[in-house]
Amino acid sequence: MWPVFAVTSQPPSAGRTVGPATDCRAWDSFVARQPAGDLLQSWAWSEAGKASGETWERVAAFEPDGSIGALAQYEVRRTLFGRSVLYAAHGPVWPRSAPDSGAALDSLLRGLKRIGRQQGAMSVTVDPRRAARVDLGPRHPEAVIDPTADMIDRGLHKMTLNIQLPTTRVVSLLDGGEALMATWDADVRRLVRRGRNEGVEVEVLGGDDAKGIRQLYDLLHTTGERSGFQPRPLCFIETLGREFQRGQGALLVLAHFQRRVIAGALTLRLRERAWYQVAGSIKERAIKHANGPYAVMARTMSELASSGVRTLDLAGVVERNDYRSDPAWEGLSAFKRGFGGEPVRHPGTFDLVVDPFWYTLRGWRRALVGLGRVRATR
């Protein structure tokens, strides 16, 4: 039997309510203020998901004055027998160091469970991220870095499955120039210079540049075919770039060589933090020494720093000799590791059980499928 858990905590503070959110500015402002707030909980991310056919909803715990005290946006994922799982990617988000933050989180989790019952969900899967020390700042206590205890204390079940990449790196952008470059590996500095000497030119665009986004998507599709993954549809990336550009939070950088676009990246920003989220490149023998991805990353970091961004999350980096990681990500991770940064391991996923019967049944089904796979490999 799989254990069944429920939220068991103190009653919410008087006057706190839980319901749908409709103010995109208040939502993103709250996410941006939290050291562990994440791009995947931004308003634009769910709008992009909706544009590509996904089902997303938003819910917040509101304080008595109407301000947001905690929030989560989640994708409704259909599963067996017409049931569903509500998945909050790198959510929920709440002010972990605030004196009454626990009450806001409790209210939100209770609200999510109630909504789950109304929608026929088996469970709500949450995936809170871990904050990086460079995002926390010197005045934040160490206790706010890892949210595992917050989840376990409230009776959520720790899962072994990672939906998002469990590790990343967060780079402090410093001055965006010499001080930043000094933190890179020597080989990275050499490859950036080599590309410049080969004649690589870099173009800086906004996230709403339709032609540039299409060029980036072509690069992403090429990278996917080379690396064996299926990229999100073009409409997702177009919506993401356009929505972030409205708040001057999108940066599109393309590298040109011999009249071709050979590498590109779309970086997305929430106030002083940014994410290197969508990137692609061409890999051919004839352009080997152009080092397009290195030119794009170097210019991206410089542009972000000059606009006031303090940190860049490299959005998924496997550390060397990490036995728990998927080796398929090693090549891309080796490229990113060369740009330094603080390694961060997220705590993973936790399940808030909504329907004990269906949740237990799904657990049995997973166990049987897993047993069948083990026998098939013997």
Image (cartoon, helix red, strand yellow):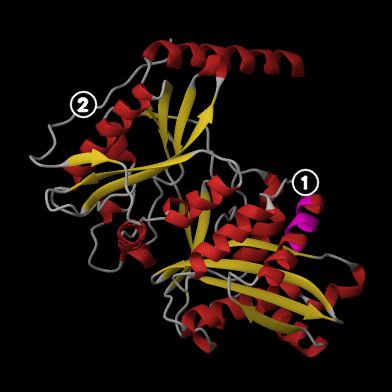
Residue 363 pos. (x, y %):
50, 16
Q: Amino acid at mark 2?
A: Thr
> Which residue is pictured at 64% across the width and 58% down the height?
333
Q: Is residue 99 above or below residue 206?
A: above
Q: Visible in this render: residue 241?
A: yes
Q: Which residues are magenta?
A: 219-224
Q: Quadrant of residue 334?
A: bottom right
Q: Specify the label residue 361 is tagged with.
A: none
Nearer-the-camera pick, 206 or 312: 206
Q: Residue furthest right?
A: 286
Q: Amino acid at mark 1?
A: Gly
Mark 2 neighbour class, 10 Å CA radius: few under 14, some 14 to 19, many 20 or more: few
Residue 301 pos. (x, y %):
55, 77
Q: Visible in this render: residue 165?
A: no
Helix, strand or loop under label 2: loop
Name the residue tied to disc 2: 8
Residue 264 pos. (x, y %):
69, 70
Image quadrant in which the N terminus is located: top left
Name the residue tied to disc 1: 228
